[in-house]
Amino acid sequence: SLELFGRALGGNSGEALRVAAGLAPSLAGIGAAWLCGGRAGLRALVSQALRWRVEPYWYGIALLGPVLLWWIAFAYIAAVRPYSPVDSAGFATFFPLIVSQLALGGGFGEELGWRGFLQSMLERRRSVVSASLAVGVIWALWSAPDFLLPNEGAGGVTRFLLFPGLCIAYSLIFGRVLQATHGSVLIVALLHASMNAAEPTWRAAVPSLSDSSAVSLAHAGRVLVVDDEPL
């Protein structure tokens, strides 16, 4: 992936490639929208990205839901293994991480491509579930090379094997949110950014539970909780 090349190059060129890697799905989505629909296609994509008039509770779900679900998952793990006291200072990183993720990471860096273009295009001939499954598989394949990076590969074999299923599960969740908010990529981007910010926040707040097995269990528990709740 571009990020692998960026890490190898180092310096300003490497950093630029790493930023480009985070924006690649959305840049591809913008280009595809232009090629498939011209200016009308771009206007439709931008309209979805700026669709902010949704029920107010969706902002609460998108911004706070993921970190709350991490703590439900944490409760599952804490019941069967010892843990250190919670460091409340770890939560200070949550909202700054959401901002960075929204701008350059899994928020608008990816969702204009995954949900804004690809999901919407697939739904012309497929159901929401079928389209979400297809996007999840493509998302997992696109993200797989990241496990060659030192920090991303720290989750171990368990997380690597769990990752494709998580991409598909999250894609189903994001697809349902997109449908429920009448195509608001903004809300899905906020949710994606919040999900990405929740894990490092959780690791900082409970260092003793930040090993690979705990993280994998937390991801699985989080998906199970979400899948049990109607959207």
Image (spheres, grey):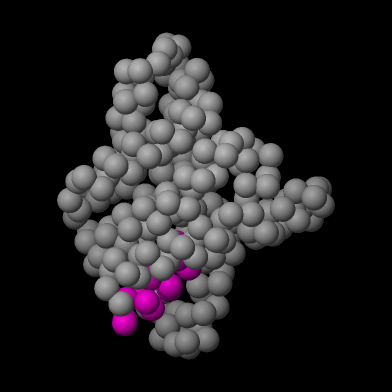
Residue 49 visible in image: no
In this rendering, the answer to whether 78 lies above or below 146 is: above
Could you tell whether 226 is left or right of 86 in the image?
Answer: left
In this rendering, the answer to whether 56 lies above or below 151 is: below
Give the image location of residue 226, x and y in percent.
27, 45
Could you tell whether 146 is left or right of 128 in the image?
Answer: right
Give the image location of residue 152, x and y in percent.
61, 41
Give the image location of residue 158, x and y in percent.
52, 38
Could you tell whether 204 is left or right of 61 in the image?
Answer: right
**Which of 160/222 is in front?**
160
Residue 119: in magenta span: yes
**Magenta part, dominant SS:** helix
Residue 29: in magenta span: no
Q: Residue at x 59, y 64 (%)?
A: 24
Q: Residue at x 57, y 39 (%)?
A: 157
Quarter holding residue 126: bottom left
Q: Which residues are magenta?
A: 111-125
Could you tell whether 112 is left or right of 25 in the image?
Answer: left
Q: Residue at x 40, y 33 (%)?
A: 218
- Quadrant containing the N terminus is bottom right
Q: Residue at x 40, y 56 (%)?
A: 168
Quarter holding residue 133: bottom left
Residue 25 visible in image: yes
